[in-house]
Amino acid sequence: MTSAADPAAPRSLHDLTLAELQRALVGAGLSPTHARTLWRTLHHHLATELAGHPDLLPPLQRWVAEHVGADRRYFTHPPTVAADLASTDGLTRKFLLQLADGQTIETVVMGFKGRHTACLSTQAGCAMGCVFCATGQMGFVRHLRPGEIVAQVRHAQLALRETGHPGLRNLVLMGMGEPLHNYDAVLTALEIISERSGLNLGPSRITISTVGVVPGILRLAAEQRPYHLAVSLHGATEEERSALVPASRRWPLADLMAACRTYCAQTGRRIFFEWTLIAGQNDSPAQAERLGQLLTGLAAHVNLIPLNPTGGFAGTATQLDAAKAFQQVLKQAGFPSTIRQRRGIDVAAGCGQLRAEKARETSPSGVK
Ligand code: SF4
């Protein structure tokens, strides 16, 4: 579930928690106050160029000159923008960000009434292989480092500032990748993002979404992590689910539901269950009934998400009438649910779609 890191390898300053930054600076003869100043410069003022920054007094300037830069212990390397698309309704903006090694990841900023939510990626590609997902269709490339997850929040905040909006209200980890397959880096990133004197997006504003990585769910519960949890189901029997979510073969539905019960019992939290509605495949009233039975006894809210079409999957989205009928069955079973708006179809806002489109554009054969 974790990415092995070489402790001697250069690190992005954005990989460091406040405690790690303090250790690094105190170890170099500076004070915790210097570390706090540098932290605010990085994570509150969102500076990327530290040399000559007016907030940094001479001792910090000297530390930066000695320790930060190419071939030094630390670096700051914000991703570059490979694509920046706005939906025609003006509510969704999708960025394809290029990382230092050339990998590209997607970050989506969605506007709702008076607030913005960013959808973050946690891996380049994904190993889970969900059949309807453009990222799953491309396969796993690598885990993101904490700083590469933090950088997406910084980028979204800067983009909102530039357009005169207040900052982000919420974060969802529902972009490219399976967050609990990259557990340590993701949880470190969230610690950095939540810090009050920096980006200050507290745990109650953050939702981790998993396709059902059972050990990760149990670890979140055991560690009493304070974030919201969303679990993607898409099928209420083993057969139906594993046809859409191959990871179900590794973590069967019965084990997943047992882990969800443990999570609710240990944390006292409810779980959001995600259900992609695919016409004629998992959207019948009988399937809604089975879902209600599966959730019996759980503190649950169901998010119903009409399918975002992808080139590699032939399914189509459930129509609104059928979605409402599905919702009605859940209501009778005692479960609240929300039919999610499909956002940014015209900017390929479904996870992995923009990267896949860009790859087709740059590949003469049309295949990555
Ligand atoms: S839906 Fe999520 S977990 Fe499934 S393949 Fe796509 S990115 Fe991975």
Image: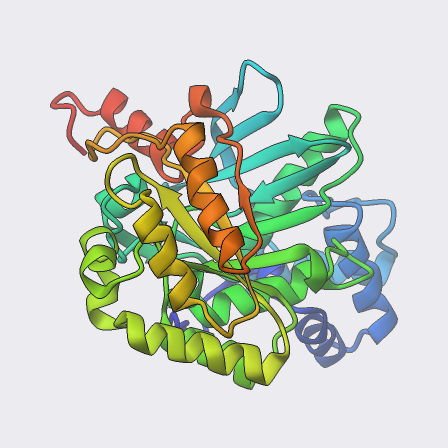
Q: Is residue 355 left or right of residue 225?
A: left
- Residue at image position (65%, 44%) is 154
- Relative to 89, does residue 228 appear above or below in the rendering? below
Residue 352, image x and y in percent? 36, 38
Above or below — where is 123 with respect to 327? Answer: below
Q: Who's the residue at 38% across and 73% down the image?
A: 257
Q: Left or right: 171 with respect to 346?
A: right
In the image, taking residue 138 as reference, residue 266 lies left or right, namely right
Q: In x, y percent, where is residue 86? A: 55, 20
Q: Residue 106 versus residue 76: which sits nearer the camera?
A: 106
User: Foreground: 116 or 238?
Assistant: 238
Relative placement, left or right, of 282 versus 79 is: left
Quarter of the figure that contains the N terminus: bottom left
* Residue ID at (27%, 72%): 251
With respect to residue 112, does 186 lie above or below?
Answer: below
Asked if residue 115 can be seen in this view, the reply is: yes
Quarter of the rendering containing residue 323: top left
Residue closer to the observer: 154 or 65: 154
Q: Residue 113, percent across and down?
A: 73, 31
In the rendered image, the quadrant that contains the C terminus is top left
Residue at the outermost top position: 88
